[in-house]
Amino acid sequence: MEQNRQSTVIITGASSGVGLHAAKALAKRGWNVVMACRDLQKAKKAAESVEMPEDSYTIMHIDLGSLNSVREFVNNFRASGKSLDALVCNAAIYMPLLKQPLRSPEGYELTVATNHLGHFLLCNLMLEDLKKSNASDRRLVILGTVTHNPDELGGKIPPRPDLGNLDGFAAGFKEPIAMIDGKKFEPVKAYKDSKVCNVLTMRELHRRYHESTGIVFSCLYPGCVADTPLFRHHYPLFQKLFPLFQKYITGGYVSQELAGERVAAVVADPEYRQSGVYWSWGNRQKKNGKPYVQQVSPQARDDEKAKRMWELSEKLVGLA
Ligand SMILES: NC(=O)c1ccc[n+]([C@@H]2O[C@H](COP(=O)([O-])OP(=O)(O)OC[C@H]3O[C@@H](n4cnc5c(N)ncnc54)[C@H](OP(=O)(O)O)[C@@H]3O)[C@@H](O)[C@H]2O)c1
């Protein structure tokens, strides 16, 4: 982005993995990075571990699983007097071995609360900050994943994501309801459902606000970053074999450093100034290492579902 003042980006979940390396990559490009993290000490250590210059970042507290915490974060950010040029919704949890759902302080199932509802509220509130920025180029980027898409090889492994008619959201999404479709709790599906919501959120943000604000909304799939702590709640054997499988069998593996660079490119480079799209570095379609605009899954491109998801999410986060 060509601007005189230093650009500011907020990255959620910048204390490890893709978010940390995106923070490093953007700091290297001269951006002021706000690392929005739930564990401040861990974030500080993480920034030091990748040798981010001290004056290139600030760390601010956010727990995306708590709507109050998201609101507090927004207030604190505004109180800092910074203007906002880009927001990266990156934080996520994946807890495949859970037998029973965990709950957010509001009583919502925690995976969807963290990955989708917290970010949904954050995006809606921070739109105002992005609008106020005097930068000509402002972007809101959400991390996607191949597992949201059953049209893809990586998305064919069951359980498949399915929001159904969002009956679980419509019924309030609290005990005993644990899934967006209102059906039985399945932790892996909860993660995939939340990532479908991430894509629907991006598309609906684009539909509602791109033309009137000029803000660029996009998602990206940086490749399979198979050795991040995202998989820390999986079986140890899975954690050992998954990176090898992705490196040597599917070829989908990407390092955390390269994934971070890819996020930084989508945030900052002129060639990614397209709104409403999903950039993919998917392994099978890789064209000389270049990403392409990929069609999202049938559910994620369903406009009626996007509207229903938006309206129900607004109610759940207290915006309606
Ligand atoms: N790994 C992959 O293969 C892959 C592929 C495609 C897309 N993605 C996407 O990339 C993103 C980052 O994943 P990753 O692989 O880098 O995982 P990761 O290393 O586990 O990073 C997740 C980040 O989210 C933070 N986080 C979790 N819950 C939070 C909460 N309640 N409030 C605030 N922050 C929270 C974590 O904080 P703590 O450090 O405190 O736990 C951590 O900083 C996710 O959106 C994921 O869906 C990953």
Image (cartoon, grey):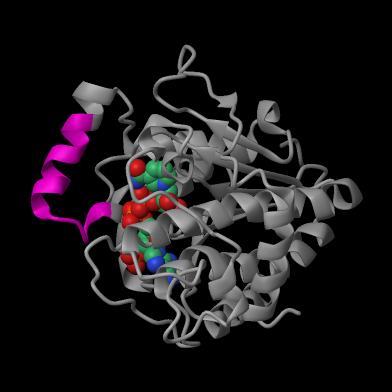
Measured from the top left, where is residue 84 in percent x and y?
A: 70, 58
Whole-percent x, y for residue 133 in the image: 80, 57
Dominant secondary structure of the magenta stretch? helix
Residue 17 pos. (x, y %): 34, 49
Q: Residue furthest top?
A: 288
Determine whether 52 is above or below 107 in the image: above
Q: Nearer the viewer, residue 69 or 251?
A: 251
Residue 299, horizontal then vertical, whole percent: 59, 47
Going 48% across and 33% down the picture, which residue do you hit?
A: 151
Quarter of the image for residue 15 reads: bottom left
Residue found at x 83% / y 61%? 132
Between 115 and 157, the residue placed more toward the observer is 157
Q: Quadrant of residue 270?
A: top right
Residue 62 falls left or right of residue 15: right
Q: Residue at x 39, y 82 (%)?
A: 103
Magenta segment = 231-245
Tell me if residue 18 can be seen: no
Location of residue 266 with respect to 111 vertically, above or below: above
Q: Quadrant of the N terminus?
A: top right
Q: Give the vertical position of 79 relative to 292 (above or below).
A: below
Magenta span includes 71? no
- Which image quarter holds the C terminus? bottom right
Residue 303 as seen in the image, left or right of residue 158? right
Q: Quadrant of residue 164?
A: bottom right
Residue 241 highlighted magenta (yes or no): yes
Residue 154 seen in the figure? yes
190 left or right, relative to 75: left
